[in-house]
Amino acid sequence: MYNFRNDYSEGCHPRMLDALVRTNLEVTPGYGTDHWCRSAADRIRQAVACPQADVHFLVGGTQTNQTAIAAFLRPHQAVIAAATGHVNVHETGAIEATGHKVITLPAPQGKLTPAIIWELVRSHPDEHMVKPGLVYLSQSTELGTVYTKAELASISSLCREQGLILYMDGARLACGLTAEECDLTLEDLPRLCDAFTLGGTKNGLLFGEALVIVSDALKPDFRYHIKQRGGMLAKGRLLGVQFDAIMQDGLYLELGRHSNRLAQKLARGLEALGYPMYVPSPTNQIFPIVPNSQLPLLDKLCYYEVTAAVDEAHTAVRFVTSWASTEADIDGFLTELATAL
Amino acid sequence: MYNFRNDYSEGCHPRMLDALVRTNLEVTPGYGTDHWCRSAADRIRQAVACPQADVHFLVGGTQTNQTAIAAFLRPHQAVIAAATGHVNVHETGAIEATGHKVITLPAPQGKLTPAIIWELVRSHPDEHMVKPGLVYLSQSTELGTVYTKAELASISSLCREQGLILYMDGARLACGLTAEECDLTLEDLPRLCDAFTLGGTKNGLLFGEALVIVSDALKPDFRYHIKQRGGMLAKGRLLGVQFDAIMQDGLYLELGRHSNRLAQKLARGLEALGYPMYVPSPTNQIFPIVPNSQLPLLDKLCYYEVTAAVDEAHTAVRFVTSWASTEADIDGFLTELATAL
Amino acid sequence: MYNFRNDYSEGCHPRMLDALVRTNLEVTPGYGTDHWCRSAADRIRQAVACPQADVHFLVGGTQTNQTAIAAFLRPHQAVIAAATGHVNVHETGAIEATGHKVITLPAPQGKLTPAIIWELVRSHPDEHMVKPGLVYLSQSTELGTVYTKAELASISSLCREQGLILYMDGARLACGLTAEECDLTLEDLPRLCDAFTLGGTKNGLLFGEALVIVSDALKPDFRYHIKQRGGMLAKGRLLGVQFDAIMQDGLYLELGRHSNRLAQKLARGLEALGYPMYVPSPTNQIFPIVPNSQLPLLDKLCYYEVTAAVDEAHTAVRFVTSWASTEADIDGFLTELATAL
Amino acid sequence: MYNFRNDYSEGCHPRMLDALVRTNLEVTPGYGTDHWCRSAADRIRQAVACPQADVHFLVGGTQTNQTAIAAFLRPHQAVIAAATGHVNVHETGAIEATGHKVITLPAPQGKLTPAIIWELVRSHPDEHMVKPGLVYLSQSTELGTVYTKAELASISSLCREQGLILYMDGARLACGLTAEECDLTLEDLPRLCDAFTLGGTKNGLLFGEALVIVSDALKPDFRYHIKQRGGMLAKGRLLGVQFDAIMQDGLYLELGRHSNRLAQKLARGLEALGYPMYVPSPTNQIFPIVPNSQLPLLDKLCYYEVTAAVDEAHTAVRFVTSWASTEADIDGFLTELATAL
């Protein structure tokens, strides 16, 4: 079976595994106060060119979004998100569980725009409704699409004008930034966002998300929030060791680039076989539209997920590549598929 | 430096590390739905002799306590705990963050008794106060003490009579159950508790707590709660792989027994040097009382934590051993200490 | 100035005022445990023909919705509502503040249908999303429309099949049930709903909502929730005295009928003057579409609210009548408007 | 039956009733945006000599404490209170329901001291525990005792030094400030507290608490919080009308003085009959210690509440007077009691 189910099907990339094995018997203080976490945070500050940023390491993506958003907002404030946003759909109400409403509008290709944000602000004018407080977006999005530098800058500008916090969920940041059509760089993020994450779980770590807090107003007491939300890892150095490894020699972005390249090769191959794409994603998630009659065939060839019914006879499915995907996976799958058709 | 700071200063025991390395490139489905988690859950059900229990794997202790308690209680219900209980003191209000009050009374040696529980129930008689809903205790306790079978049975009996859920935090369960004075076994727990945990983080895993839900009323939809509280690990198999390894060949209890033995050897050695104990702990946490004048000496010899000021001139400190502690650590430290005095 | 701003612009109907004045110096126990509350609850149980229902009195509508929904749901469960639903839009995230997501779809004329509910259930299939737990609807709706007996029965039937709690917000129940096109009666409600409210604030009381809990599963400990959410009135008898008065001699429905009659007379008069209605409401809220150029004229004649921009040149406004509106108000306003045009 | 059960057994003082009757048919905008609320707020600002304070009107005491504290604190912050504090004991976990822990120590006679506050601050030093954020105290306290100007000043000074918000619950402020041994005045409060309330429910209103916010940092968006917590009264002018009436001609303090005088007369009378006091309260709540054998006699003579078992044979009970108590009540009760003994 070929595996295109997701980008977290295996353990971790060999370099992180080596680092974990090598440091296993080291004695360090707990809860992320160790030298590996310090070193990893320094490497991230350097990579994003923001020496004064605070960097925290958490275990998972939902946990990171929940902890950050709950720490950043006052009780009456709401999160603005695309209707397809991860915090709106796929976190089992984790944001609401901390007391905050997520307000949304449909967003073409999963991307917020200044117009959408403004419409949500405009329609929440007084104390009988929640007050928009934070804009959540992800790079890449749930549909694999990416924000360009100009797009993010225009959103950032509106956020500043309206006093909204801009938070970027970078669960798939490596893929987002290395997509061909993306001109954003790591160094751009602190200038445009108040806080953002560098995802590890979906980019070759066993687990781990790095939260970068840029705005001074959001920094105080953040470790209290990590602990209160259950995200403070006793052996916190596991996060430091892994991020320290991946932030060296360009590995972080390299793994994203690798995933993208294979996904795009797969997309071109599928298009050549006559499958149109549901959404034009330049990253490691692609969404071919498949005749329902061919789904049993797919089930035999590979792991994948169903995204949406396109019409009565067609389904958009999701294929995902990862650091662990190989050229041979793509070639083999395309060949077997072509043969079977 | 000798390390008696805690039982989570290193990575993990070699058997778990081997298992992680060996399975690293396996492709599995995410979120704990893989075969390793199933196997580990089966092993735990077998070890506790409760085939119908539900077993879930979470990453950390605070997260597990928070998720379980919030899932089990209705909004107006409170947690009964010892004043020293971990949920009361050391979780940054994680329980309250989910809406529930923790009500406490001082508990000698950190242990709840039926009398304490009854006093808290009796003093909360009507709707102007919270309603006691769950009894939280830990085995071993924050002070290293343990509940005997008779003690736990009497608490369990009161809980059933009063309609209280009995939840045992087993972050240090291996040490608790293998303490010399403890006659409780793994098989006793499902008979006496509604839910309990088998701690991994403090017993040789990189991380991980196994939550065993015995009462049918507490089982439905529990995975929703794990996800909502940010505790659902994408690569959930990491928990399964580790618990699958530690639940074989008696390793789980063996590591607890090892830690206890070294801690008790250290305690006896310290007593021989004239240090009384703050509390008579039979497990891997011991609490010698040290003249304040000797604290600088301790600081040079080892890592430890301060527990409490006993009087103006003495301090109770905490020494903890772990699976990674060695006979040589104890002997070496005692010798160096004796020499330095 | 004519007043069509809302149905809570004045104090209370004379009968309730008399009752309050008459009983002012009576000594009663607090918190709704007095004989007036008992009597009022009995009258309500009789009116809805449900002797085993629990009846609680709360002060306001948002408070009642929040308290009931938070008491009824487990943490991972969500509320299904129309996108225009009061709990979704106009309660400043009160439901989310208790931890629950409100999931919605656009609902024609503000009314849920089995198809809408089913679509929301169907699209929330697993633990990575919230679990639909309760259907919220209001009678009459935010747009003045009403559910017929057949419509409510079909929703009720789906709710039972899917294990969803059906909760009816009756802030404007008197108007809803006495609308010409509504064949639902008070006696129908306990058969179809798990819980519902009889609104007082918008029907001639100083304040007060009566919550009727029909389902046994939702009854236990409800007074704890009222207290915890800040809704337990010290002088609770104020609620009992008022509801006791309004539940006599058919006054409750009579006030709704009165409001409806005047609103419908106003609607017919406005239509005769050439104003179409934004939505065909048979109750005390009507929504004429007005050329923007005439808004300044309206501003001079009466109080009203803006509902929505219909197109660049037209606005839908809301006119509301109440127990305090008079025939002369309607006639006078229509005459002045016709004259001014 | 004489009534000493509490200070909210009747409706309201005639002046407030007259005001409500007189204004009943006025048409005003809703939600406290009317001219009565503005006028009442102005009178309060004048009475406390703080022109820049924000004044909000809420319905009940628990609601006001919950709304204010939840609005003022960030999620990881805790409330410091006396163990007997209303927010700790008698609000059914309303504070915890908004996510905040209440940390306490036993406080002699129900009064916090700088030493108690400091001990709670000192023992919560890091992110593994909640962070003290607000000091809650009430004037008068749950035991009828009062803070003097010097006592409150020393607490205020510590709060400022430690960055703690100082919040005074004035549910019984009129009695607190007019107690013979109290040298605090309304004008002192804005200088010493960050926010405080003037209680109405227990001082002759049907209901209503006025929240005075002094610190600029606590003011923004407060009306959102009132709405979100269910405390925004649709006919908000009921609060304005009543507070406008009671803040005229010194009535607010006069009613407190009246209650105190009668309670103290009762206390002296009871002492003369040989009943010692459980706590030396100078306000309208007194706590005589009664032989258990005489409780049945008391039950026949009057309404009262039980406070605590003093020993096996004696009980401390609570007698409360109010604006509605009369000289004749006290004289009559004391005579009947003396006769019956």
Image: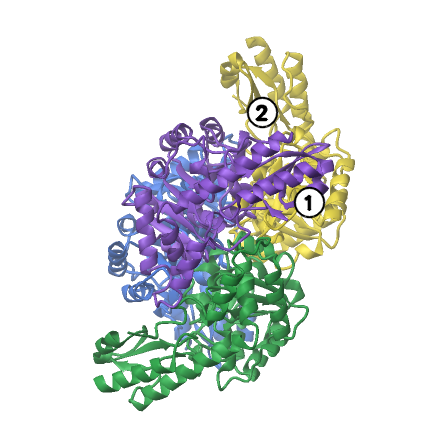
Chain colours: A green, B purple, C blue, D yellow
Classify residue A243 as left or right of residue B118: right
Mark 1 burial class by Cα count in 10 Å: few <14, some 14-19, many 20+: few
Q: Residue at x 39, y 81 (%)?
A: A263
What residue is shown at x 51% (from left), y 16% (from top)?
Answer: D295
User: Which residue type does callout 2 highlight?
Assistant: Arg
Tag on residue C28?
none
The residue closer to the viewer here, D305 or D158, is D158
Task: Check chain identity for marks 2 and 1: say if they share one.
Answer: no
Please tell me which residue lies in front, D157 or C309.
Answer: D157
According to the picture, the residue beneath numbered tag 2 turns out to be D318
In the image, is D111 to the left or to the right of B68?
right
Report the front residue among B98 and A26: A26
Identify which amino acid the numbered label 1 is placed on.
Answer: Asp
Q: CA distance from mark 2 to mark 1?
A: 55 Å
- Which chain is home to disc 2? D
Q: Is residue B115 left or right of residue A9?
A: right
**Parent chain of label 1:** B
Camera-side residue: C159 or A207? A207
Asked whether residue D84 is in view, the answer is no
Dividing the picture into quadrants, the one containing residue A114 is bottom right
Q: Position of residue C15 (x, y in %)?
A: 45, 44
Q: Position of residue C328 (x, y in %)?
A: 46, 61
Q: Position of residue A203 (x, y in %)?
A: 47, 72
| Position of the N terminus of chain A by quadrant | bottom left
In the picture of the structure, the residue carrying the numbered disc 1 is B299
| Local SS, label 2 | strand
